[in-house]
Amino acid sequence: MTGPSALQVSDRALVLYALVRRANIEHALGEFGDDLRRLRQAENARAETTRWLERESLEDAPTDVERRLLDAPSGSWPNEAVADGMWRKEALGVLLWALGHVGVMPGFGEEFELSVLNERIEAYGSVSSFRANGRLRGDDELVPAWQEADAWFAATEGNLGEDAALASISAERARALGWLRNRDAPPP
């Protein structure tokens, strides 16, 4: 199996960064109801994300589902899409770890902190610098991480209630690490 290149992983991380940010905006809109000021701010952010993806040659990088979500009017995401989008931060964290932008993955009972992930991307000041500074970890680190994630995923898949967070963390991390090992697998 051959994994994706550092550039492919960087670009996938950037798409997840945009998707997670949008999911958090959608979540906030759900919290504030029909606040027109916040809805206008969200629409401005959506338009800026579209321009950013185009400017950074990422307009074709989102999957079909991601493209539909990113193009959807603000405040229109179904609750399930919002929750899934917010959990994608775990896949984003794995990709940033795999590129060396994050030193250590949190344990499976802990989530990646979104503010830390955002900072790791934004710290470079430009997308080109972010892309240039990513160095993929070797199989000696990726394979054991995938094995651990796969075991956690198998043990927690479908868990509900208090264990639902652990199941979501495990699923996102296993999917991301699976793609890192095989670029033909569905992207995280």
Image (cartoon, grey):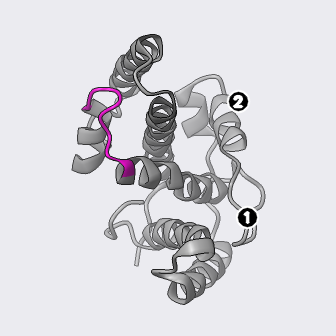
Spatial separation of the CA atoms under disc 2 and disc 1: 23 Å
Disc number placed over residue 123 in the picture, else none: 2
Say which quarter of the image contains residue 147: bottom right
In this picture, residue 117 sits left or right of residue 41? right
Return the residue nearer the eye: 151 or 31.
31
Q: Which residues are magenta?
A: 72-79
Q: Are marks 2 and 1 in contact (CB under 8 Å)?
A: no
Above-or-below relation of 169 to 151: above
Front residue of this view, candidates 169 and 2? 169
Q: Mark 1 falls on what kind of element?
A: loop
Residue in view at x 34 percent, y 70 percent: 185
Task: Report which residue position mark 1 lands on.
Answer: 110
Q: Is residue 159 above or below residue 176?
A: below
Residue 25 relative to residue 47: left or right: right
Please name which of the two marks, 2 or 1, marks the residue nearer to the observer. Answer: 1
Residue 30 point in image, percent of width and height? 45, 35
